Structure formats: C-alpha cells, structure tokens
Amino acid sequence: MNAVIPPLQQAARQSLFPGAIRTVKRIPRDEMLDVVARIARAVRVPVTADLEAGYGTTVKDMAETVKAAIDAGAIGMNLEDVTGDDESSHVGLPLQVEKIRAIRETSKSLGVPFVLNARTDVYLMPIGPEATRFERPLNGCAHTATPEPIACLCRGYTTAKRSLSW
C-alpha cells in the first residue's frame, strides 16, 4: 500500500492545475474530467472522481457526466447533495434519487460497474433542523434502492452524536 501512495500523490500533483490553485467546487466539468483522465492514465489503480453534484440538475446531465467520467477512465464518483455554499443549494430528495438512478442506469447501459459514493453535507453546512440531520441521509439512501451498493457518506457526522445499528 505504501508503494502506491507516493505515485498517486505525484500523479495528482502533476495533473492538477499548473497555474493558480482554484477552488474545486468552481472547476467546470470538462476541466475536472481532463484532470481525472490525466490521473487515470498516470496510475495503475482504479480511480474514482469527486464530481461535485454531478455537474447538473437533470437526468440527462447525470448521464452525460457518467459517460464522460467513464471515458476519462474513472470507475466511480462522489455525488454531493449540495450545489453551492449554503442551505438553499441543498438538492431535494426526489431530485437526488433521480440523479442516483440516472447514474446507475447509465453505467449499467454502458456495461461498466461503477462505484457511487452519495455524499451529504447536512451536518457540515449545517442544513435543516439538527433533529432531522441523522434520518435524512439514511432515508435518501433507502429511497435509491438499487441492486448495486451505494456508499452514503455524511461529512461532519460524528459517532458521538448518535450510533448506527443495522
């Protein structure tokens, strides 16, 4: 494992913006996917990409993003549930479910197993009443029921707040 990390770090440094460092959330999709492609070509391990909120709000946008990510060499992606910097940018559950299903259907139609990390920032930003922040992401994951596994990540959540049991 230790032998893999330095080449990954080097590839990432070399492929990321040679000029000024930009805030990642502001990078256009094509530019981000260019970086993903350079990393995927430089390493011999699977690459997943942090593709923000999927660079769009429609099923068509998600399909285009997934196709482009696969073309770039990615085998997976992170998908956030916010599109900006405040609570008003939180993507509603019905739309997020549609986006996740579109990602799944597109990768399946291309015959590519695709790892999807559905990430929520309800704790980090914070979004909504504190009492609902635990259940909302879990309900979102449950509503996306697909045969393929989805990793649901809650940034800013600590187990000291509440324990999970399945």
Image (cartoon, rainbow, N blue to C red):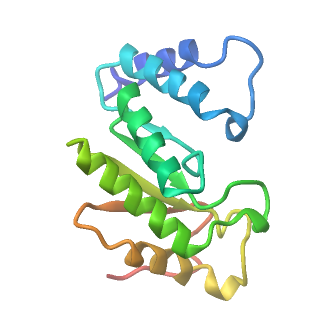
- 12 relative to 77 in the view: left or right: right
- 134 relative to 85 in the view: left or right: left
Depicted 141 relative to depicted 84: above or below:
below
Front one among 110 and 146: 110
Front one among 85 and 34: 34
- 26 relative to 136 in the view: left or right: right
Depicted 67 relative to depicted 79: above or below:
above
Depicted 73 relative to depicted 42: above or below:
below
- Identify which residue is drawn at 48% across, 41% down: 65
State which quarter of the image contains the N terminus: top left
- Identify which residue is drawn at 31% across, 32% down: 46
User: In the figure, residue 85 lies in which quadrant?
Assistant: bottom right
User: In the figure, residue 6 lies in which quadrant?
Assistant: top left
The x, y position of residue 27, in whole percent, is 68, 33
Q: Is residue 159 visible?
A: no
Q: Is residue 34 visible?
A: yes
Front one among 22 and 91: 91
The x, y position of residue 71, in whole percent, is 37, 28
The x, y position of residue 107, in whole percent, is 30, 47
State which quarter of the image contains the C terminus: bottom left
Depicted 122 relative to depicted 71: above or below:
below
- Identify which residue is drawn at 33% across, 38% down: 75
